[in-house]
Amino acid sequence: MNPRTQQLALQGPAGSLQALVDRPDLAAGQTSVGVAVIAHPHPLFGGTMDNKVVQTLARAFVQAGWMAVRFNFRGVGASEGAYDEGRGELQDLLAVIDHFSPAATQQGALALAGFSFGAFVTSQAVQSLHAVRSIDRLVLVGTAAGRFEVAPLPQELHAKTLVLHGEEDDTVPLAAALDWARPQNLPVMVLPAVGHFFHGQLPLLRDLVVRHVAVPLA
């Protein structure tokens, strides 16, 4: 964990939610772009905000000037509540987004990211939020298509979206991600010879995300 990482307890729909916040180093000349909220993989299979892919996403956003927010879904770590098959987890994610980027003000840019189960929950959040507020960047990694009801993404968000999937993902087969993306004509960036957890390829994952989220906002 970065020495500057801030530990927080937020009020969620089912009780307290454990969160970590990393900020760009403004003293070193970095500019502040906005807030990025990152969702972790499946709570029942060891998924937490400390997952290596989630940490890598946070580092990428901070490197590109975003404040990165990670949190534990209900029932994970010190977060209160119990696993709710994605329904309650969506409410957790929406509560965290509203805490750091209130819909009433919408000050600053908003980015959303998720890994595996977290990408599924993030897709549902996009569907819920798109009609009422701007989402400036979206990153979905190892999207758990086929396992969960991953929501289609609005056409106008496609240019702001990066979908990454490992060619040799044995948790969520690449074919399932393509079956989800194909009807939407949504591009998927495939990383050759890479598995679900990006072992040995986390620096590449970070660099690809930085390249996507560091592009000047329209």
Image: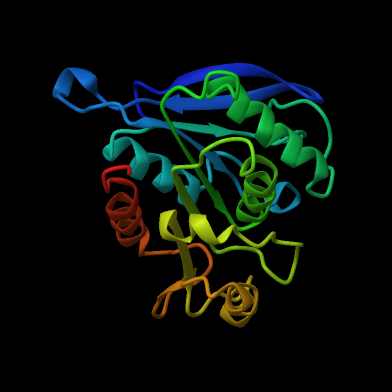
Colour scheme of this structure image?
Answer: rainbow
In this rendering, would 3 be left or right of 176?
A: left
- Quadrant occupied by the N terminus: top left
Q: Residue at x 60, y 73 (%)?
A: 177
Q: Is residue 77 visible?
A: no
Residue drawn at x 42%, y 59% as measured from the top left: 159
Rendered position, 46 above or below 200: above
For residue 4, what is the image quadrant? Answer: top left
Q: Quadrant of the C terminus?
A: top left
How many numbered marks, from 0 up?
0
Q: Residue at x 35, y 33 (%)?
A: 66
Q: Is residue 50 left or right of residue 43?
A: left
**Where, by quadrant of the figure, is residue 170 drawn?**
bottom right
Query: In the image, is 33 to the left or to the right of 37?
Result: left
Residue nearest the observer in this picture, 47 or 187: 187
Report if residue 59 is visible in the image.
yes
For residue 32, above or below residue 192: above
Q: Is residue 114 above or below residue 174?
A: above
Q: Residue at x 83, y 49 (%)?
A: 85
Q: Residue furthest left?
A: 29
x, y percent for residue 123: 64, 53
* Residue 172 in picture, x, y percent from top left: 63, 71
Give coordinates of residue 139: x percent, y percent.
47, 53
On the image, the x and y values in percent for residue 210 come to 30, 50
